[in-house]
Image: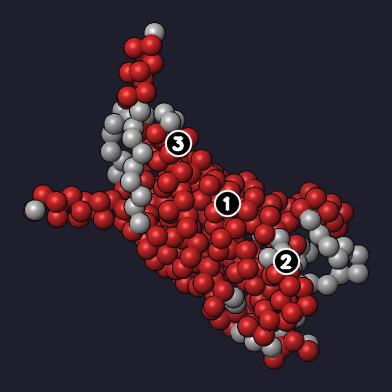
Amino acid sequence: MMESSSLQVQQRPKRKPVVWSNIGVGAVLQLFEVTTLGQPFEVIKTQLAANRKDSMISALKTIYSRGGLLGFYQGLIPWAWIEASTKGGVLFLAQNEASSFFASLGFSQTVSDTAGGVFGGVAQAYTTMGFCTFMKTVEVTRDKTGAGKDMSTLQVAKEVFRTKGISGIYRGVTAVAVRQATNWGSRFGLARVTETIFKGNNKDRKLSKWEELGASVIGGALACWNQPIEVIRIEMQSQLKAADRPEKLNIISCAKYIYKKNGILGFYRGVTPRIGLGVYLTCVMVFGGDQVKELIRARKETKLDKQ
């Protein structure tokens, strides 16, 4: 019996060494994602979730009225760029390390990648995302027609810090952490489950690029099951004023407020653009990340062979 246990321990994969290039890969991919389609999806989603009585058409008109096509990139510079250049690297490093750790304990690749996604998402929220996510939401929801229309985004940030301190600029960070943990746990996990289904009985078969891309699309779309958490997060960080809105919101009180105002459907406002965002983001970060990491690995092996 002891010999059998020893064999099982020996057969477990060893922990992989830290791959520092993952920080750069994650940063570049996340910057590409947010600068292309990512931010427009984010702005539309935030507009609908914060203004839950808006239709898709009225939301698009409101966004367009804030600067034409540039209105769809509100919050991109500097907040989304700062966030993307840091959170992508944090995600890839933390996810890779956590996934490698769980795999070394004997868990399957699917379970390991899911756990890695959860750890990576939480690491993002508490290291790089809190302030930037808050300021992106502020840019989309603040009044740009009244007294604050001439304030730059940096002036707004300074004013929030002056009046509410560090807790003010990290408002809603717990909701961000819950969202990110469920986001990336689901995206990595569902993508890997889909890949396993595609392989069928031949578990060693290498998937085609189209199959890998399809797995990312499915994983990204299904990962939007946590839309209620995202609506709560946006409401907590929103700058919109309402007479009956509690001054200090936590996740529970915010959920009660949304339900009171809009019912159960209020928790799913903005889910359509979020599905688009989730699919695009997962394709870039999971499928794209796999391709880039494989390319880097192949080049390292080629260099070693030449030595």
Q: Residue at x 43, y 31 (%)?
A: 105
Q: Outermost residue, right direction?
A: 244
Q: Quadrant of residue 9?
A: top left
Q: Outermost residue, top direction?
A: 1
Whichever of callouts 1 and 3 sits on the residue coming sooner in the sequence is 3
Residue 213 in the image: x percent, y percent? 38, 49
Q: Residue at x 73, y 56 (%)?
A: 232
Q: Quadrant of the N terminus?
A: top left
Q: Residue at x 46, y 43 (%)?
A: 98
Q: Quadrant of residue 240?
A: bottom right
**Mark 2 touches mark 1? (CB < 8 Å):** no
Q: Is residue 218 above or below residue 35?
A: above
Q: Secondary structure at mark 2?
A: helix
Asked if one can make out residue 137 in the rendered structure from this viewpoint, the answer is no
Residue 161 in the image: x percent, y percent? 71, 76
Q: Secondary structure at mark 1?
A: helix
**Mark 1 touches mark 3? (CB < 8 Å):** no
Q: Quadrant of residue 61?
A: bottom right
Drawn side of residue 180 relative to residue 230, left or right:
left
**Mark 3 touches mark 2? (CB < 8 Å):** no
Q: Amino acid at mark 3?
A: Phe
Give the residue number, with chain letter if any, for mark 3.
Answer: 102
Give the residue number, with chain letter if any, for mark 2.
Answer: 167
Asked if one can make out residue 150 in the rendered structure from this viewpoint, the answer is yes
Give the residue number, with chain letter if any, for mark 1.
Answer: 122
Drawn side of residue 146 relative to residue 18, left or right:
right
Q: Amino acid at mark 1?
A: Val
